[in-house]
Amino acid sequence: MTLALLLGPWCFSATERFGVGVDGKPISDLGGPGIRVVVLIFAASDCPISNRYVPEVARLHREFTSQGVHFWWVFPNPQDTTSIVARHDRAFAISESVVLDTQQTLVRKAHATITPESAVFVIRDGSMREVYHGRIDDRYLAFGRERPAPQHHELEVAIAAALAGKPVTPSAGPPVGCVIVPRQS
């Protein structure tokens, strides 16, 4: 029986093969030395809501990276090729790590369906356990309906709770954005 099966549906090995970087090289480690929490941000190069969250994710990255948090932009849609994502990252000045989830492995592990959607995993004893899955904040009420500013920063609160070893509050509402295109077998 594999480690992933022993850990259950919300846990997986921190060193599986997850996809490829924009350089085309396989990515098999989402954490690394000193990393206690991994944050996945599911995105699509052509999703306007996903793109509008780039500054917020950059802010969270600046706030939490020194505390052992590693952020990943995850591009799961088949049309997001390495060249398209590399161009997108340059256009939006994305400095966080990027993985093309070509087999939608991370989509399945995090139960993601929308871009942008986030997942927070705590690394412990070589495995990752999901502690949060949901929206980044409550800025978007529905597609085409948004607040001038979010009232609740759910991802930020989840990361802080995970770092403190406290229970993480579930997302208070569904993420709003673009549907992740299912991978064709």
Image (cartoon, helix red, strand yellow):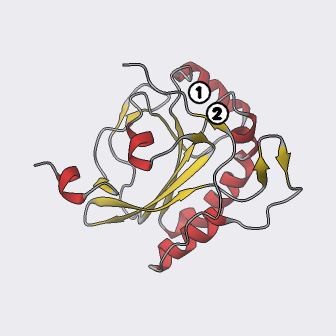
* Structural crowding at the residue carrying mark 2, measured as other residues with C-alpha within 10 Å and reported as few (<14), some (14–19) or many (≥20): some
The residue under label 1 is which amino acid type?
Val
Compared to residue 74, the image places residue 23 above or below, namely above
For the image, the number of numbered tags is: 2
Q: Mark 1 points at which residue?
A: 85
The residue under label 2 is which amino acid type?
Asp
Instruction: Return the residue nearer the eye: 142 or 123.
Output: 142
Which residue appears at 65% of the width and 24% of the height? Answer: 87
Which residue appears at 44% of the width and 24% of the height? Answer: 183
Residue 22 position in % (x across, y down): 50, 29
Residue 129 position in % (x across, y down): 36, 61
Taking the image as shown, residue 50 lies to the left or right of residue 121, namely: right
Q: Is mark 2 on a helix, strand or loop?
A: helix
Compared to residue 172, the image places residue 78 above or below, namely above
Taking the image as shown, residue 59 lies to the left or right of residue 131, namely: right
Tell me the number on the disc at residue 89. Answer: 2
Q: Is mark 1 on a helix, strand or loop?
A: helix
